């Protein structure tokens, strides 16, 4: 009587028996069957006649079944017959393996085993135990059994089934405490061999990466014992670590303020221990999954700690230390420790989700974080100033408006009108808060007077631009924080504090981009952000102090040795110049670019010189008319070419940096639109430094720049010749008029006259024909006499100079009659003199038509048409 498996699907299979070779014994359908006497069989019935059994194999004894190539199962029965089943599909092989696993784990055949054989050309065949008998260690370990226990744990360690079975054995038999007890005995007896074996056993268990094992190791009752075992590492037999003494040292845990919640106190200590295990004790043992497991435990603990701080009175008690005016030594020490504690909280918050960080940072600010800044900025301890500045930077990098902005709309203001301090005079939410004293900015009264029950604030995700879409956002024009950060950057010699101050300044000067808004976000999403007063206050109050070293460089040739500071300033120039409408006037009025140029001189280290070149390169890429004229008029490329010649054509970082600058100018020169400034720069470079470009022609940048300018000159010369022909043709018309030809003949001649094709003058070089026609019409209306010469037209450059009315731009590039380019450099003056002498000697030099002459020629043409009419 049989007990068939009703849920089992028949699978098509070929049966092979091994004699000298594998012999095909037929094709049929295979299934597993359990008899009433609890014996299991593998049965294959002929596909043509189901009554004909091709195979009936009993599953018994210690038979080992091998799964090969996903569709093949091979074994040797107790009589020594080698049998193989080749399945048509992979599912059939998997189904039979599941039946074998069921038979083994159901104790129907507890000694059989099933292994997977994976063929590897490099390492040979690799076997993995799928199911089978497990060699468990002795339940009560002894010192003499440690070697066998280690071999047992390392056997089949690549098998998931084996590792899971060993893990369950350790958990159910409370095996880890037994090993810890054996460790204590071995340590008391100074049995080094046993201690080394125990260390390897714990390492093997950790490498299992089984959750059950990791949880047992991290249990408070087992943790210190496991850490003690790992101190005796056989890889370093002559040394012993002191992990336990370090973790037991209570001085490592300084309680700044009494923490009444024992659970949170324990959580903080446990998180510290987990961090120490991950980074020190287990650093060489953890693979990625185990590392992630411990990191996840740490993260969950940190989230729970942050939530406690956000809702509990502890933070209020901490900030209360900064309200008193007392300055005794004990209070000073306690305040400094609180800054360190706040710094740790902020570092923990960095790993949280954005909305969690926003909620926590807002909670800190509302409760009085900004009050601690007064203490941070005025403390004598450099370490405290660095930590405090890092706190500010962390919050600014997350959302600058949390530090320096006020966000309100009319609805919110009406709702919280009775809660917000009316002394701020911020009745409509659009005007920035005005400070009544230098440090009013740090009082954070606005935040503290909002009830803690206000759920609207934490619910807002300030990293989402849609939150700002219908808000009126003003940046505070109080520059106290920026001034203090500037002072740190300029005066403090602590490199850590300087870099923190630099990063904070960058974030505060770029509030819009700190919202993490995608580049394709609609502009009206940020329409409510008011920044004009903020930046006007910056350039009026902070920038003169911040960039004072560069301003003084222009006025004084004596250079300072603080190259690190100048590197930071060069980076800030690059950063600030992006908003040229606000920064341009300040940079030009204070000759900042001249100061940058002086930093390229050989008296400075190479890192600073390249930073200065990058600054000028960023200015050039703005493609700004005023910057371009200033660079040309002050010959700011002089130091760049001196640096270029120092390279002597050697391909290094300096050489590549300057060549990249040439490539930028050349690519801008070749653009169809907006290339005027690049054309001026290219002509300026070729006119003054052509010999240097020719000298170092190992790459094409220099020669290509020269060729582009020369091609432009040739096209201008052709335009001059065409205009000369047009002028001569016009003179012949005047002679015909003097000979008395009637108007009809003259009109017919005008109609038959072929039009002289000329290249259209560029928009930046001439006024539009419509403007010229309009001016001539005004003259005709005023006087009926024929117009011989149009009224003098003021060119576009002169209009700009008059509008600026600025002393700085009085020296800006102006085009004269003999040259389209002029510089104030001695080299340019010398070359102009040489050209004049060459012209007096009778050389064939083609005179370039100036803009004024182009206007006159165009005016004459149009005026003659009006006269003829």
Image: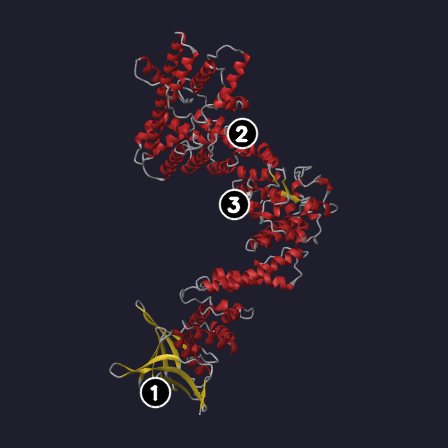
Tell whether 376 sits left or right of 665. right
Whichever of labels 1 and 3 marks the residue nearer the N terminus, that label is 1
Q: What number is the disc on residue 829? A: none
Residues marked 1 and 2 touching at CB (< 8 Å)? no
Label 2 sits on a secondary structure element that is: helix
- In the picture of the structure, the residue carrying the numbered disc 3 is 520
Whichever of labels 1 and 2 marks the residue nearer the N terminus, that label is 1
- In the picture of the structure, the residue carrying the numbered disc 2 is 585
Q: Residues within 10 Å of mark 2 (few under 14, many from 20)?
A: some
Total number of numbered labels?
3
Q: Nearer the viewer, residue 657 or 339?
A: 657
Residue 747: image quadrant is: top left
Whichever of labels 3 and 2 marks the residue nearer the N terminus, that label is 3
Tell me the residue at 36%/17% (across/down): 724
- Taking the view exactly as shown, the residue that stands out farthest to the right is 418
Quadrant where the image shows the N terminus: bottom left
Q: Nearer the viewer, residue 258 or 301?
A: 301
Can residue 2 be seen?
yes
Which mark is in front, 1 or 3? 3
Q: Taking 633 as reference, is 422 above or below it?
A: below
Residues marked 3 and 2 touching at CB (< 8 Å)? no
Q: Position of residue 465 (x, y in %)?
A: 58, 47
Can residue 324 be seen?
no
Q: Nearer the viewer, residue 598 or 141?
A: 598
Tell me the residue at 63%/39% (across/down): 476
Q: CA distance from mark 1 to mark 3?
A: 74 Å
Q: Residues within 10 Å of mark 1 (few under 14, many from 20)?
A: few
Q: Position of residue 461 (x, y in %)?
A: 60, 51
Q: What number is the disc on residue 78? A: 1
Label 1 sits on a secondary structure element that is: loop
Q: CA distance from mark 3 to mark 2?
A: 30 Å
Q: Position of residue 18 (x, y in %)?
A: 28, 82
């Amino acid at each position: 009587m049989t007990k068939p498996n009703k849920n089992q699907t028949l699978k098509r299979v070929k049966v092979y028996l091994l004699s000298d070779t594998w012999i095909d014994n037929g094709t049929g359908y295979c299934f597993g069957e359990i008899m009433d006497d609890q014996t299991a069989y593998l049965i294959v019935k002929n596909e043509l006649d189901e009554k004909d059994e091709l195979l009936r194999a009993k599953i018994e004894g210690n038979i080992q079944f091998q799964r090969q190539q996903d569709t093949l199962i091979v074994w040797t029965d107790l009589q020594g017959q080698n049998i193989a089943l080749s399945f048509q599909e992979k599912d059939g092989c998997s189904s039979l393996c599941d039946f074998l696993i069921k038979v083994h784990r159901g104790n129907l055949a507890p000694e059989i085993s099933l292994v997977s054989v994976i063929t590897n050309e490099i390492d040979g065949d690799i076997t993995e135990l799928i199911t089978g008998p497990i060699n468990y260690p002795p339940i009560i370990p002894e010192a003499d059994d440690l070697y066998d226990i280690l071999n047992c744990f390392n056997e089949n360690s690549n098998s998931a089934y084996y590792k899971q079975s060993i893990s369950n054995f350790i958990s159910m038999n409370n095996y880890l405490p037994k090993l810890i007890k054996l460790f204590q005995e071995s340590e008391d007896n100074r049995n080094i061999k046993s201690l080394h074996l125990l260390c390897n056993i714990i390492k093997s268990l950790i490498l299992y990466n089984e959750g059950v094992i990791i949880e047992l190791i991290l249990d408070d009752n087992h943790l210190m014992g496991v850490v003690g075992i790992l101190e005796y590492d056989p890889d370093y037999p002559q040394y012993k670590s002191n992990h336990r003494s370090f973790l037991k040292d209570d001085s490592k845990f300084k309680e700044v303020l009494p923490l009444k919640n024992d659970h949170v106190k324990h959580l903080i200590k446990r998180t510290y221990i987990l961090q120490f295990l991950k980074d020190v004790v287990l650093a060489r043992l953890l693979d990625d999954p185990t590392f992630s497991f411990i990191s996840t435990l740490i993260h969950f603990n940190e989230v729970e700690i942050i939530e406690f701080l956000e809702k509990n009175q502890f933070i209020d008690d901490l900030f209360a230390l900064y309200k008193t005016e007392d300055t005794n030594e004990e209070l000073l020490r306690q305040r400094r420790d609180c800054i360190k504690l706040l710094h740790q909280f902020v570092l923990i918050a960095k790993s949280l989700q954005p909305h969690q960080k926003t909620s926590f940072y807002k909670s800190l600010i509302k409760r009085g974080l900004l009050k601690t800044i007064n203490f941070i900025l005025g403390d004598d301890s450099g370490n405290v100033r660095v930590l405090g500045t890092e706190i500010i930077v962390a919050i600014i990098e997350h959302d600058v408006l949390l530090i320096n902005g006020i966000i309100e709309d009319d609805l919110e203001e009406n709702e919280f009108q009775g809660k917000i301090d009316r002394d701020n005079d911020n009745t409509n939410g659009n005007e920035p808060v005005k400070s009544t004293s230098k440090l009013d900015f740090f009082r954070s009264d606005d935040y503290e007077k909002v009830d803690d029950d206000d759920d609207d604030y934490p619910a807002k995700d300030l990293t989402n631009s849609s939150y700002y879409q219908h808000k009126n956002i003003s940046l505070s024009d109080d520059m106290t924080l920026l001034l203090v950060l500037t002072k740190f950057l300029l005066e403090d010699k602590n490199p850590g504090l300087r870099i923190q101050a630099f990063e904070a300044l960058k974030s505060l000067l770029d509030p819009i981009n700190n919202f993490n808004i995608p580049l394709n976000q609609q502009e009206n999403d940020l329409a409510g952000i008011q920044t004009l007063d903020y930046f006007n206050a910056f350039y009026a109050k902070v920038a003169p102090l911040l960039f004072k070293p560069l301003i003084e460089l222009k006025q004084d040739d004596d250079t300072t040795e603080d190259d690190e500071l100048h590197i930071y300033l060069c980076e800030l120039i690059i950063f600030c110049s992006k908003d040229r409408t606000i920064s341009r006037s300040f940079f030009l009025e204070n000759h900042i670019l001249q100061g940058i140029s002086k930093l390229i001189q050989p008296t400075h280290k190479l890192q600073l010189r390249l930073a200065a070149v990058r600054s000028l390169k960023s200015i050039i890429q703005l493609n700004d008319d005023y910057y371009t004229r200033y660079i040309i008029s002050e010959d700011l490329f002089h130091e760049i070419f001196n640096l270029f010649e120092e390279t002597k054509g050697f391909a290094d970082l300096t050489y590549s940096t300057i060549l990249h600058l040439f490539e930028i100018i050349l690519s801008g020169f070749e653009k169809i639109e907006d290339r005027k400034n690049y054309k001026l720069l290219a002509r300026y470079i070729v006119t003054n430094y052509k010999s240097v470009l020719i000298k170092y022609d190992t790459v094409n940048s220099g020669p290509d720049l020269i060729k582009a300018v020369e091609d432009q000159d040739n096209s201008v010369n052709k335009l001059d010749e065409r205009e000369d022909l047009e002028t001569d043709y016009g003179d012949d018309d005047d002679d015909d008029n003097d000979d008395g030809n009637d108007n009809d003949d003259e009109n017919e001649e005008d109609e038959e006259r072929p039009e002289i094709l000329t290249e259209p003058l560029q928009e930046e070089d001439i006024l539009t024909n419509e403007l010229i026609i309009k001016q001539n019409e005004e003259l005709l209306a005023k006087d009926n006499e024929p117009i011989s010469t149009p009224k003098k037209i003021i060119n576009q450059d002169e209009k700009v100079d008059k509008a600026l009315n600025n002393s700085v731009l009085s020296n800006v590039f102006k085009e004269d009659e003999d040259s389209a380019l002029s510089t104030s450099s001695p080299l340019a003056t010398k070359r102009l003199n040489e050209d004049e002498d060459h012209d007096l000697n009778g050389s064939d030099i083609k005179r370039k038509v100036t803009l004024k002459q182009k206007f006159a020629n165009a005016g004459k043409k149009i005026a003659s048409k009006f006269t003829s009419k």
